[in-house]
Amino acid sequence: MSGFLALEVNDVRFIGIWGMGGVGKTTLAKLVFQRLSHHFEVTKFLFNVGEVSAKHSTLVDLQKQLVSPILKEKTQVWDEQQGTVYIRKCLFNKKVLLIIDNVDHYNQLEILVGNKSWFGDGSRIIVTTRDERLLIEHDIELSFKVEGLNDHRALELFSQNAFKKDQPKDEFLQLSKCFVDYARGLPLALKILGRSLYKRDLNAWNSALDKLKTIPIPTIFDSLKLSYDVLDDMQKSIFLDVAHFYKGIEKGQAIGILESCGLCGCIGIDVLIEKSLIIIEGFDIVGMHDLVHEMAREIVRQECREDPGRRSRLCNQNDVFGVFKSNTVSK
C-alpha cells in the first residue's frame, strides 16, 4: 500500500482498495488517513458513500463536506452539477488527501472526484469498494485487494474482542480456534463473534458454536448480502447456482453448464469475481468464501423455511430426500 501512495512523488494519484464485505477496507483506509493527514493541505474522509447516496438519492451533502474546509462561509450548493463546479474550483490547487468510502456506483466517483485535474499536485484520492469493476471503469490503475487475515492474526483479533487481550484463556483455546476457523479470516465475523462471547462461560461458548451450524449470524449475513442485492436477476441466479452446484469445479466447465441453461455464464462469472462474491483458485477452480457460501444457501432457505420443495434450489441431502419422499416439489 505504501508503494502505491508514494508521497515523495508530486503527481495526483487515485488508489483503489477493494475486497469482499467485512474484510477491512474501511479500517485500512482509516489507518492511512490517520497516519498521513499531516502531509496534506486539505483532508476529508467521506464514510459510506453508497449508503448515503441510496438514502438521500443525491450527493449534494457530501459535495458540501468536500468544499467546506476551503469555503469559510456556508456553502450554497443546490444540485450535484453545481457541486462539481465548486469542488474543482476549491481543490484544483490544493494538495488533498481524500477517502471515498464504500462506493457502489460509478456516478458517485464522477460526481465527487471526477478526474485528476480536479486536484492539486501531490493529492491522493483513495476509493474503497466491494466492486473492482468501478475502479476499472474510472481508470484507477493503482488498486489493492484486501485479503482475509491469516490464522495467527485472526486468533489475535478474535481474542481482543472475546477476552480484551491478544490471546485466549487456556481453557477457551480450542473453542476459540473453532470460531476462528468458522470466520475464515473475515475481520467483521471475528469481531462480532468475539464480542458476542465476551464474559460468557464454556457452556455458552459450546451452545453458540452449535447454533452457528444451523443459523448464520444476522449482522454478518446482512453485511455480505449487500453485495448480492446489487446484482441483476440473471447475476443473482448465476451466483446462487454457483454456490449450490458449481463451487469446486473448473471455471470453463461452470460457464458451459450455465450457458447451456440459457444464462450468460462468461460475463456473469466475471461480474461475480469483480464484486468479490466468488474467486478463481489454482487450476482455474471456482471458489467462494465459506461465509459467502453460507449466505447464498440462507437466501434460498428463506424462500420457504417450512417447505424445501418450494425453494428454487436444493443441496442438503436430507432436504432432497424429504422432497422426493413426499413428492412436494412446487411447479
Image: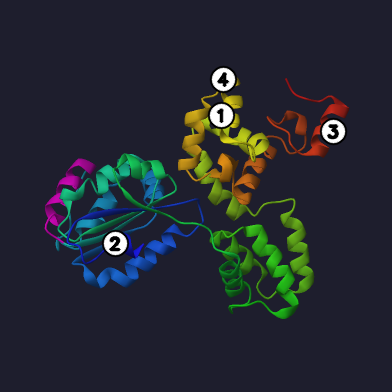
User: For the residues carrying marks 2 and 4, which lies nearer the camera in this image?
Assistant: 2
- Vertical relation: 323 (above or below) 260: below
Q: What residue type is labelled 3?
A: Phe
Quarter of image, res 255: top right
Q: How far apart are marks 3 and 4 (CA)?
A: 28 Å
Per the image, the residue denoted by label 2 is 5
Per the image, the residue denoted by label 3 is 321
Q: Which amino acid does label 1 sit on?
A: Ile
Q: Which amino acid does label 4 sit on?
A: Gly
Q: Which residue is drawn at 47% across and 36% down?
A: 271
Quarter of image, res 244: top right
Q: Provide the secondary structure element on which disc 1 rests.
A: helix
Closer to the camera, 223 or 153?
Answer: 153
Choose the circle earlier in sequence order: 2 or 4: 2
Residue 92 colored in magenta in the image: yes
Q: Can residue 57 be seen in this view?
A: no
Per the image, the residue denoted by label 1 is 255
Q: Which amino acid does label 2 sit on?
A: Leu
Q: Residues within 10 Å of mark 4 (few under 14, many from 20)?
A: few
Q: Which residue is drawn at 84% across and 27% down?
A: 324
Q: Provide the secondary structure element on which disc 2 rests.
A: helix
Per the image, the residue denoted by label 4 is 262
User: For the residues carrying marks 1 and 3, which lies nearer the camera in this image?
Assistant: 1
Q: How crowded is mark 1: few (under 14 residues within 10 Å), some or many (20 or more)?
A: many
Residue 87 colored in magenta in the image: yes
Which segment did they paint magenta? Answer: 80-94
Choose the circle earlier in sequence order: 1 or 2: 2
